Amino acid sequence: MASAGTRDGSVTDEERRKEITTTCDFFEATPALRAPTHLVARIFSQLDCVDLLNCSLVCKQWYIDTRDLREGWENEYLETFSMYAFLLKR
């Protein structure tokens, strides 16, 4: 189910709750899925690249929630790689 979200593409708490209640009973959902979006984003922002990738594999909602952070890690990796790529050439 695609939701409209906000102008920046993020999902509001209300849209998140609607999506959870359509896929499963809100009260049976895990506490991590019921957590406010800003709290989930704060937790994910503290993770390193490997942990963030592992979290994105847990469920669809976490995959969506980690998208921007994963792109940030990817950009950082590519920037670092291009900066030090000359050391790899012989």
Image (spheres, helix red, strand yellow):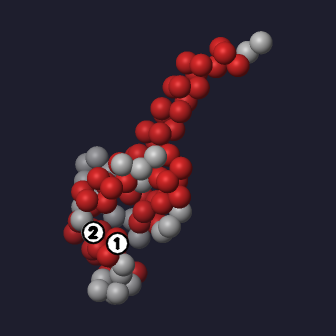
Query: Residue 29 location in percent, x, y?
Result: 36, 81
The answer to whether 78 is drawn above or below residue 68 in the figure is above
Quarter location, residue 39: bottom left
Q: Which residue is mark 1?
A: 33
Query: Residues at badges 1 and 2 in contact (C-beta under 8 Å)?
Result: yes
Compute the Cα span from label 1 to label 2.
6 Å
Query: Residue 31 location in percent, x, y?
Result: 32, 76
Q: Residues within 10 Å of mark 2 (few under 14, many from 20)?
A: some
Answer left or right for 54 relative to 40.
Answer: right
Image quadrant where one finds the C terminus: top right
Answer left or right for 37 relative to 22.
Answer: left
The answer to whether 71 is drawn above or below residue 11 in the figure is above
The answer to whether 53 is drawn above or below residue 83 in the figure is below
Amino acid type for the residue under numbered disc 1: Leu
| Residue at 47% from the left image edge and 53% from the top image edge | 52
In this view, the residue in front, 9 or 51, is 51
Q: Please, what secondary structure does the residue beneath circle 2 have?
A: loop
Q: Which residue is mark 2?
A: 35
| Residue at 53% from the left image edge and 58% from the top image edge | 54
Q: Residues within 10 Å of mark 1 (few under 14, many from 20)?
A: some
Amino acid type for the residue under numbered disc 2: Ala
Q: Please, what secondary structure does the residue beneath circle 1 have?
A: helix
Which label number is shown at residue 62? none
Quarter location, residue 10: bottom left
